[in-house]
Amino acid sequence: MTPGEAPEAIKKAVQESVRETNHKTMQKAFRVSNAMRNSVIEVLTNPSPSPPGSPPGVRSGFLRRAWKTGVRNNGGSGGGVSIVAYADAKAHYAGYLQDGTKKMAARPFVDPIREDVQPEVDAIFADF
């Protein structure tokens, strides 16, 4: 390789490294998304009725089933990527259970799900 070819070779090597890193990150993000879905199912298994302050109990099972999970690439600054794994509750009443109402105490489930899935997320990204 000549000194004039070196910059282009370095540029190609860096681009390939970035491509591989982005690919690995996407794979891990999908694993995190699956872990979040599993955690939702695990946390939302309380018998009904649930006591105030604990995750909601299962009556019909709709809240456990009504989740959208996935991964999205939000772009990033400086040409990088910003990959987000998500789990969104799609039951229209999820917010009422999470925060409570005037007539019902809260049955929070977001923090218990987050606490349940965090060790698995850490393990997924530990070997990066």
Image (cartoon, rainbow, N blue to C red):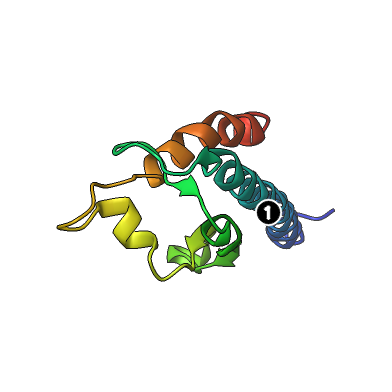
Residue at x 58%, y 37% (from the top left corner): 121
Point out residue 95 in the picture as x, y percentages from the top left corner.
Answer: 33, 61
Point out residue 52 in the picture as x, y percentages from the top left corner.
Answer: 29, 39
Point out residue 112 in the picture as x, y percentages from the top left corner.
Answer: 43, 37
Q: For this view, does 43 lie left or right of residue 99? A: right
Residue at x 59%, y 39% (from the top left corner): 42
Point out residue 34 in the picture as x, y percentages from the top left corner.
Answer: 67, 50
- The furthest residue to the left: 102
Disc 1 is placed on an element classified as helix
Asked which quadrant contains residue 108, the reply is top left
Residue nearest the viewer, comparing 49 with 3: 49
Residue nearest the viewer, comparing 82 with 78: 82
Quarter placement of the C terminus: top right
Give the total of numbered labels. 1
Residue at x 68%, y 53% (from the top left corner): 30
Please give the residue where the numbered disc 1 appears in the rendered image.
30
| 81 vs 116: above or below | below
Q: For this view, does 13 lie left or right of residue 43? A: right
